[in-house]
Image (tube, grey):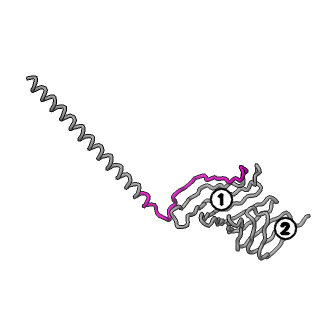
């Protein structure tokens, strides 16, 4: 009787170990299947992002650039969309852009705004359009519909109509070249100069 119990006990122990091994293998297989299934889904999601859709969207976008720990400029926009899957990655600011130039000071010395902007990452080129306004440290106001800002050349230029308002006159013309802070500028083809009456 004791021998039979002993044999029966060994069989139960053997059966229990066998069941645990089967459960362990089943869990391992399940986790492996889940892991590879998730990887496939991630790859499917990544591949389903169209090239003409933004890969990143930022609401209330704001960034700043400093040099030697001194604030140089800030960029602000209601929304920024980044198209990182394009052959030429770019950012779009569909609801406008505001750039404040600080030059290490605590308050902006100049600023630029527009209703639309696009930044070409590889070329380091800004396309700024629609109601573009730039104000320099002298209080001169530039108005146009299109500006290109070349970061590498440190140049702002346009071939469109421009209007510059100074304290005593308004100058209009076609085409302009300037430094990014609009402190040194030149109108290519001046069309008219209107002087204000001092009286």
**Could you tell me which quadrant the N terminus lies in?**
top left
Q: Residues within 10 Å of mark 2 (few under 14, many from 20)?
A: few
For mark 1, give the secondary structure: strand
- The one nearer the camera, 70 or 109, is 70
Taking the view exactly as shown, the residue that stands out farthest to the right is 199
Taking the view exactly as shown, the residue that stands out farthest to the top is 2
Where residue 174 sits: x, y (%)? 74, 75
Q: Quadrant of residue 157?
A: bottom right
- The one nearer the camera, 59 or 13, is 13
Where residue 125 sits: x, y (%)? 64, 66
Where residue 58 sits: x, y (%)? 57, 54
For mark 2, give the secondary structure: strand
Ranked by sequence position, the earlier of labels 2 and 1 is 1
Residue pictured at 29% horizontal, 47% vertical: 29
Reading the image, the residue beneath label 1 is 97
**Is residue 110 in view from this perspective?**
yes
Reading the image, the residue beneath label 2 is 169
Q: Residues within 10 Å of mark 1 (few under 14, many from 20)?
A: many
Q: Verify whether residue 66 appears in magenta.
A: yes
Residue pictured at 66% horizontal, 65% vertical: 128
The magenta stretch is: 45-70
């Amino acid at each position: 009787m004791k021998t039979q119990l002993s044999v029966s006990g060994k069989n139960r122990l053997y059966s229990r170990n066998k069941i645990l091994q089967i459960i362990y293998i089943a869990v391992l297989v399940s986790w492996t299947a889940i892991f590879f299934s998730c990887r496939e889904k991630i790859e499917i999601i990544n591949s389903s992002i169209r090239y003409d859709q933004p890969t990143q969207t930022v609401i209330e976008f704001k960034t700043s650039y400093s040099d030697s720990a001194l604030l140089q400029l800030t960029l602000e926009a209601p929304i920024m969309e980044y198209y990182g899957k394009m052959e030429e990655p770019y950012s779009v600011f569909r609801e406008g852009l505001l750039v404040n130039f600080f030059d290490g000071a605590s308050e902006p010395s100049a600023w630029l705004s527009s209703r639309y902007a696009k930044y070409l990452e590889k070329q380091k080129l800004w396309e700024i359009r629609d109601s573009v306004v730039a104000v320099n440290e002298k209080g001169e106001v530039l108005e146009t519909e299109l500006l290109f800002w070349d970061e590498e050349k440190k140049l702002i230029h346009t071939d469109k109509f421009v209007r510059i308002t100074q304290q005593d006159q308004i100058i209009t013309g076609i085409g302009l070249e300037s430094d990014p802070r609009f402190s040194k500028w030149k109108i290519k083809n001046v069309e008219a100069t209107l002087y204000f009456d001092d009286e």
